[in-house]
């Protein structure tokens, strides 16, 4: 019998949260969500070709535009790998997603042109929306939770328990136009 890592409350909560989200989307089935097998630390989470496919897929969803970095430029693939390491039960989901992307293009996804990659992803979005949803949601999560992106989108994080941002005083004159309108209801 192999050594199994003890479940901490944080690890259990994260597993439940991700499993519920994925089960609600139909992507993850109950037997897979409840497995407790763990890859050993010496196992490679994703090989180079799989990481390259994931990189290109994420970058088609959030490409660089000269001002904003692409998903891979801010560490999107590393984020997915960290999730796979923390929650190894989700590894088959990502491995299946990547295999499905490469299978749909009938060649290595990273070796085709951008327009073809977009067509493959649109096909997956239309015909296998559960796979596309996993790619889209984890790509967005990796991007918009990255501190590098915060200043680029004007987001200022405030820790729990802090005062938070100062609100501007309310300008009561903004309601003048609405107050001048006739009522759209009948007085009884």
Image (tube, rainbow, N blue to C red):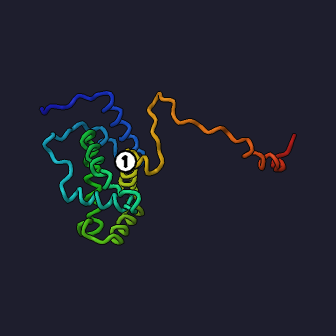
- Tell me the residue that label 1 is attached to: 148
Please give the name of the residue rendered at 39% of the width and 47% of the height, measured from the top-left corner.
Answer: 141
Quarter of the picture containing the N terminus is top left
Q: Is residue 26 above or below residue 99?
A: above
- Closer-to-camera residue (151/17): 151
In the rendered image, residue 11, in percent from the top left (x then y), is placed at: 30, 33
| Total count of labels | 1
Please give the name of the residue rendered at 40% of the width and 43% of the height, measured from the top-left corner.
Answer: 21
Answer whether residue 26 is visible to the viewer in this image. no
Quarter of the picture containing the C terminus is top right
In the rendered image, residue 16, in percent from the top left (x then y), is placed at: 36, 36
- Which quadrant holds residue 127? bottom left
Element under disc 1: loop
Q: Is residue 61 above or below residue 112?
A: above
Answer whether residue 168 is visible to the viewer in this image. yes
- Closer-to-camera residue (178/184): 178
In the rendered image, residue 162, in percent from the top left (x then y), is placed at: 48, 29
- Which residue is situated farthest in the right direction here? 188
- Closer-to-camera residue (43/25): 43
Q: Is residue 31 above or below residue 64?
A: above
In the rendered image, residue 5, in percent from the top left (x then y), is placed at: 20, 31
Please give the name of the residue rendered at 29% of the width and 28% of the height, measured from the top-left corner.
Answer: 8
Mark 1 crowdedness (10 Å alpha carbons): few <14, some 14-19, many ≥20 = some
Please give the name of the residue rendered at 37% of the width and 61% of the height, measured from the top-left corner.
Answer: 64
């Amino acid at each position: 019998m192999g050594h199994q890592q003890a479940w901490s409350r944080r690890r259990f909560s994260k597993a439940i949260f991700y499993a519920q989200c994925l089960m609600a989307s139909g992507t993850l089935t109950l037997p897979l969500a409840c497995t407790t097998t763990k890859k050993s630390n010496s196992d490679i989470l994703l090989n180079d070709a799989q990481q390259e496919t994931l990189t290109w897929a994420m970058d088609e969803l959030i490409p660089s535009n000269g001002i904003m970095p692409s998903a891979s430029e801010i560490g999107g693939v590393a984020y997915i790998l960290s999730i796979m390491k923390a929650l190894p039960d989700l590894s088959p989901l990502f491995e299946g997603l990547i295999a499905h992307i490469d299978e749909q293009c009938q060649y290595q996804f990273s070796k085709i042109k951008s327009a073809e990659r977009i067509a493959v992803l649109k096909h997956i979005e239309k015909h296998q929306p559960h796979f596309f949803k996993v790619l889209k949601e984890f790509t967005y999560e990796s991007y918009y939770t990255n501190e590098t992106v915060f200043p680029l989108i004007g987001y200022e994080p405030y820790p729990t328990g802090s005062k938070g941002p100062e609100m501007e005083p309310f300008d009561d004159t903004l309601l003048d136009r609405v107050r001048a309108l006739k009522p759209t209801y009948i007085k009884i």
